[in-house]
Image (tube, rainbow, N blue to C red):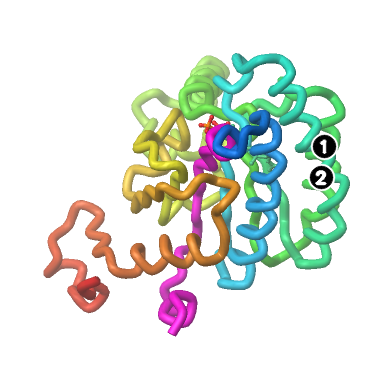
Amino acid sequence: MSLKEKLDPNRIPRHIAIIMDGNGRWAKQRGKLRVFGHENGVKAVRATIEAASKLGVQYLTLYAFSTENWQRPKYEVDALMHLLIRSLHRELANLHENNIRLHAIGDLDSLPKEAAKGMQDAIRKTAQNTGLNLVLALSYSARWELAQAIKNIAAAISKGELEPGNIDEHTVAAHLTTRQIPDPDLLIRTSGEMRISNFLLWQIAYTELFFTPTLWPDFNEETLCEAIYEYQHRERRFGMTSEQIGSENHTEL
Ligand code: FPP
């Protein structure tokens, strides 16, 4: 029985977020340039979207480019932007046919014009789709997002639209770029690194974390199922006790 067949179709995580890491090391192991790793990373992106969509995942968020990634050598940043533009051109029709709706979080204004326009067009074109919501984090960092939220909350206060005493968790969540998106149930990071790297810091308060040594270009349906299988055998208590949440969800691995 394959891992996929062992999954409980009624407990597929609604939202999976992925820190795609290890493209550079994957290329280096093959004596190639880092860009070769990113090119093969795009193949893993395609395979993961297809697998998540078939499994019935509702939201898939991919950390494609962080605010800190701008500090990489110019040729690598240019190559990543080029890959994004090319992938959007090549994949848009396919995404659309598969009823996938594209979203973006991050500072899209900081992207090269062609990349920002490509994203905006793709978001518009797929806006009515009702299948998988694919969220690309581009020029994104959680600290940037939180600073933006604070700025916008302060502006609402100074316009008299908001009372400081009324600010609560919902106010903050409503000012994040993810306001229309539920918090991730499962966060996967590839390549064996055990860090969050400034990704969705607010949203992952109760997210289950899964770290795999697999380098991103080798990530596929099998690795995704492995992560979901482990997720399905965790007990999510959200700060409560096992007894309070009922122990029927808890199965030993
Ligand atoms: C991390 O590997 C990966 C990235 C910084 C970029 C991820 C981008 C892609 C998979 C391709 C473009 C994406 C889309 C959505 C078209 P790394 O370079 O940090 O690897 P290393 O840690 O081994 O050096």
Residue 202 place in picture, x, y as percent = 40, 36
- Report whether 2 appears left or right of 252: right
Q: Is residue 83 visible?
A: yes
Q: How crowded is the residue under tag 2: few (<14 C-alpha within 10 Å), some, or many (20+)?
A: some
Q: How many angstroms separate mark 2 from mark 1 (CA)?
A: 5 Å
Contact between marks 2 and 1 (CB within 8 A): the answer is yes
Residue at which label 2 appears: 88
Q: How crowded is the residue under tag 1: few (<14 C-alpha within 10 Å), some, or many (20+)?
A: some
Tag on residue 85?
1
Residue 133 place in picture, x, y as percent = 64, 57
Q: Report ligand 1 position as a quadrant.
A: top right
At horizontal 64% and vertical 30% (from top left) the residue drawn is: 34
What amino acid type is highlighted by mark number 2?
A: Leu
The quarter in which the C terminus is drawn is: bottom left
Q: Residue furthest front?
A: 31
At horizontal 45% and vertical 51% (from top left) the residue drawn is: 184
Q: Is residue 156 visible?
A: no
CB of mark 2 near ligand 1 (< 8 Å): yes
What amino acid type is highlighted by mark number 1?
A: Ile
Residues in magenta?
1-26
At horizontal 70% and vertical 31% (from top left) the residue drawn is: 35
Residue 117 place in picture, x, y as percent = 85, 33
Viewer-proximal residue among 180 and 209: 209
Quarter-wise, where is residue 171 in the image?
top left
